[in-house]
Image: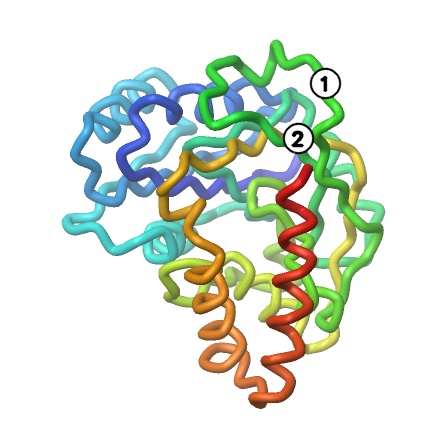
Amino acid sequence: MPLVSVIMPVYDAIETVEASIRSVQDQSHTDWELLITDDASTDGSWELVQQLAAEDARIKPARAEVSGGAARARNAAIDRAQGSYVAFLDADDQWLPGKLDRQLAFAAGSDAPLTFTAYYKVAADFDGAARDFDPTDRVVHAPAQVDYRAMLQQNHIGCLTAMYDVQQLGLRRMPDLRKRQDYGLWLSILRDGDHARGLDEPLALYREAHPGSLSGGSRLRLVRYNWQLYREVEGLSVPRSVWALGQVTVRSTLKRRV
């Protein structure tokens, strides 16, 4: 039964973080540690996380003195990870109860150091619990396999479903970007010839962003973040960056329609 280190950044998530944590506690696979980094929340999230941690020693919270963004919060948690696998869950998303069991079995039978799954989309105001979720047709599917070229054309990996094998990769951190840092990590893993395997079974709930939020920012702003990732992190040439940006913009538009 491998220990899984679950990485959760928290920033002003008082309305959703408890449900996210409970969805980890409801996992049929119980050998996990939940590494939370509170990014200097101001709404009571940190106090709530501390209360929940006092009830379950597997929840291990830490707090940043000043807000540094999601990448730094995630990396601070990754640096504390002790597990054989590292998985990711944001403080407004949830896992279905069998997520870890199903994905661990899938990973064990795979030759890939990085695995991911399909997931459901739910509305921004969703207030239910994953354990009571009734399946819908709003599914973002997972391709069976992706490599570096495929990922340049579209980020196929939902962060809430990603899990990587520490024994194969070591602890891998995210690039320090305001957005698209998870995409940057997947690209860095695949850049040297590795591939990722997808389990096309929806095992998580992704909450749509509220209008005006950072995660739901304008498409123009998202184009800028992708360009920064391709040019400054991946070091792609201008022509290749233009090609990748065109591909990912079109495909992301189609993905938003789910």
Quarter of the image for the C terminus: give it.
Answer: top right
Residue at the image position 64 percent from the left and 84 percent from the top: 240
Residue at the image position 49 percent from the left and 56 percent from the top: 219
Residue at the image position 26 percent from the left and 22 percent from the top: 48
- Mark 2 touching mark 1, by CB under 8 A? yes
Q: Position of residue 18 (x, y in %)?
A: 39, 21
Q: Position of residue 215 (x, y in %)?
A: 43, 46
Nearer the observer, 131 or 255: 255
Classify 10 Å Cα crowding around label 1: few (below 14), some (14-19), many (20 and above): few
User: What residue is disc 2 on?
Assistant: 120
Residue at the image position 23 percent from the left and 30 percent from the top: 46
Helix or strand or loop: what does disc 2 sit on? strand
Does residue 183 appear left or right of residue 217 in this picture? right
The kind of residue tagged 1 is: Pro
Residue 57, quarter of picture? top left
Does residue 254 appear left or right of residue 206 in this picture? right
Q: As displayed, is residue 186 above or below residue 14?
A: below
Does residue 68 appear left or right of residue 250 in this picture? left
Looking at the rendered structure, which numbered label has been put on residue 135?
Answer: 1
Residue 206, quarter of picture? top right
